[in-house]
Amino acid sequence: MKVLSKPIVLMTALMCSYPLYAAHSSPSGSAAEYKIDRNGGGKLYTLTGKIDVHSEPERASPVIGKYGKGSIFAVMGRARGTDYLYVSPCNACKNGFVRKSEFFKKVRR
């Protein structure tokens, strides 16, 4: 049995056509759900600089991960009505949100 690499398995999951919702807990313990538009999602990018991943699509939301140059991110889509992308930094990391304008300044295309 051939084992596929993590990026291939992740990309296969991203190409499915079902709607995507991101559910995250706030520091107070309340849950929030965000609709993710998948247009433009499903691509892998390599960071050329440092970036923070947030728990919610808001600048003041808690940082759930800090990633440096060389990290590979899968963009899963855009948080509807915001300037934030929903990303997966790796298969074992927490998914979260990055500011779209900041993200595309710090990735290799």
Image: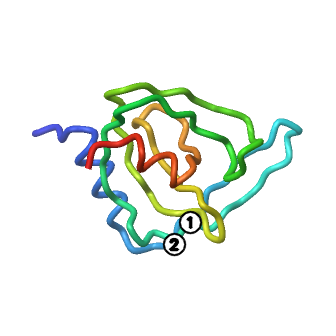
Q: Secondary structure at mark 1?
A: strand
Q: Residue at x 80, y 42 (%)?
A: 26
Residue contact between numbered discs 1 and 2, judged by CB atoms under 8 Å: yes
66 vs 35, nearest the viewer: 66
Q: Secondary structure at mark 2?
A: loop
Residue for badge 2:
19
Image: 86 above or below 54: below
Residue 92 shown left or right of residue 26 in the figure? left
Q: Residue at x 51, y 53 (%)?
A: 101
Please count the marks in the image. Answer: 2
Residue 85 shown left or right of residue 108 in the figure? right
Residue sitting at the far front: 105
Dot 2 alpha-carbon crowd within 10 angstroms: few under 14, some 14 to 19, many 20 or more: few
Q: Residue at x 53, y 63 (%)?
A: 78
Q: Residue at x 31, y 38 (%)?
A: 46
Image: 13 above or below 30: below
For residue 36, the mark is: 1
Residue 99 at x, y = what percent? 57, 50
Dot 1 alpha-carbon crowd within 10 angstroms: few under 14, some 14 to 19, many 20 or more: many
Residue sitting at the far right: 28
Residue 84 shown left or right of residue 60 in the figure? left
User: For the residue marked with disc 2, what is the amino acid?
Assistant: Pro
- Displayed quadrant of residue 3: top left
- Spatial CA distance of label 1 from label 2 is 8 Å
For residue 76, the mark is: none
4 vs 89, nearest the viewer: 89
91 vs 67, nearest the viewer: 67
Residue 97 at x, y = what percent? 58, 48
User: For the residue marked with disc 1, what is the amino acid?
Assistant: Ile
Work out whether mark 1 precedes mark 2 in sequence or the reverse, and give the earlier one: 2
Residue 48 at x, y = what percent? 34, 33
